[in-house]
Amino acid sequence: MRVVTAAEMKQIDLQAIEKYGIPGIVLMENAGWRVVEIIEGIISEVKDKIVTILVGKGNNGGDGLVVARHLLNRGVQVKVLLLADPEEFQGDARINLHIWQKLGQPFYQVNQVNGINIVKVALLNTHLVVDALYGTGFRGTVNERVGRVIELINASNLPVVAVDIPSGLEADTGQINGPCIKATQTVTFGLPKLGLVVEPGASYAGKLHVADISLPRVLIENKDIPRQLLTRELVSSWFKPRLTTGHKGTYGHVLVVAGSRGMVGAARMTAKGALRSGAGLVTLALPGNCQPMVAAALDEAMTIGLPETAEGTLAGSALEEILQACKRADVLAIGPGLTTQPETVELVKTLLPALDIPVVIDADALNALQGATDILSCLTVPAVITPHPGEMARLLDRPLTEVQNDRLNVVCKAAKEWQVVTILKGARTVIAVPGGKLYINPTGNPGMASGGSGDVLTGVVAGLMAQGLTPEQSAAAATFLHGLAGDLAAERLGQRSALAGDLLTHLPTAIQELKIS
């Protein structure tokens, strides 16, 4: 599903109206209908219920007035609160305000002196609030009076349905610069807006519904829009059924180079992630003294003991053995638990340019590239990197706050500059492709913020690449499945108690839910 900016959505609406001849008031009517359908799902018996609708002067307010009319027809007691003078309404919004007036229905002007008291009284006897104040064109901060209204709504603990986007939220960034509606559910029209699917906007949107308002399909499936929200349908479409004649060699061989003394868990998690994702063969290469304990605990993978330093990390002399092992593998996953011991860092920096198989680079292999990211640009094989925000900040030599405040631009610029598929982990993980595509992942939860979770993801990415998915598909699909496994684990165990190992346990169910054979 494509994800749009406010300008892109405005252009789609204009084309629907001007090129395809769909009147704007028809789109507004359809939008109102879709919101009413969601409200009926929240309030099972709407008749005689009380709904308060906050209406702004723009098209968003017009949508809200359509909602008011249809709820009235269903026997709902509707309170319409205007945040602007009636004379300020224009176009289709003005038409719907006039319809409301012709029905003999009152409205209350909250923009007047006693407006705040009107809101307080309305909220005392209301079952649900509809936010139709500001649409996707909003930028900056709401004025003081509107801010006070928003604060009252948020403090009411009533269910709130936002029309298209919560008021106070910027559609293009997801940023909130002042008071903002904290919606229970948001009904957005045509396509999801960028600010609704990235944080912090996603948390203010609540449950997101993308409603069909009869926009031509050719417009909403426009491939020129570079951003996509990952969905079950999209991810499952990348997988082919397994052959009845398939064998372990058919589904790829992953080589994992990871681990050190005291950090063998990271190596095991990565290997298990590759196995659970469906790779036919997995070999784990790690420091020699660590091999016996790992081999005893990892029945399904092969292991290789490599030369090590006095600190129990991979030694520089391991280079040739790793390159020989790469000749028997289809994909290399490198980084988890390696440490940043200087000799190991030099090993990583020497190894990467010498590779002739695709590579997934994570954790300490990324840390080894601090100040040496030109190595990424010089790779001659397909690559996926999987930094968390701290690792990305170190790679870019930028403050962590800058990375977090500009995640989308950061990840896109990194992918383009380094020419690698880039997964920037975190709440609403984003995946950027060198050619400009951006995927936004809706799965996952705070319970996944525990040691080993990223190691599992690295293994899953490598496992999918070994099975024939492109680096782009592998990165996006692995992120979606990884997050879905985390959601399943949290549902069963709770966010506080879920461990990285539980992601491995629930990954098969996640794969089954997508009907991937």
Image (tube, grey):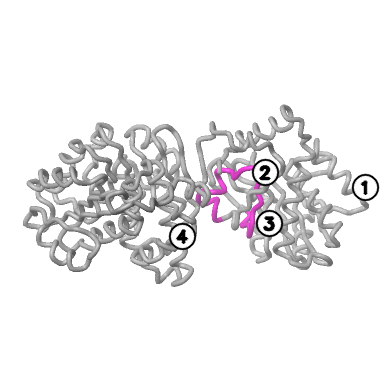
Closer to us: 330 or 199: 330
Give the distance between the C-alpha atoms of the residues marked 3 and 1, in whole angstroms.
Answer: 26 Å
SS for tag 1?
A: helix
- Quadrant where the C terminus is found in the figure: bottom left
Instruction: Give SS at disc 2.
Output: loop
Mark 2, residue position = 135
Question: Does the magenta-highlighted stretch encompass residue 200?
Answer: yes
Query: Which x, y percent locates residue 205?
Result: 59, 54
Q: Position of residue 370 (x, y in %)?
A: 24, 42
Q: Amino acid at mark 1?
A: Lys
Residue of label 4:
512
Identify the mark nearer the N-term, 2 or 4.
2
Measured in 3D between alpha carbons, the distance from the residue under mark 4 to the one under mark 1, in whole angstroms, is: 54 Å
Residue 402 place in picture, x, y as percent = 40, 43
Q: Are marks 1 and 2 in contact (CB under 8 Å)?
A: no
Find disc 1 in the rendering and name its residue.
102
Which numbered disc covers residue 161? 3
Q: Nearer the viewer, mark 4 or mark 1?
A: 4
Q: Using a 10 Å C-alpha cutoff, classify the residue at mark 1 as few (fewer than 14 neighbours), some (14 to 19) or many (20 or more).
A: few
The stretch in magenta equals: 181-203
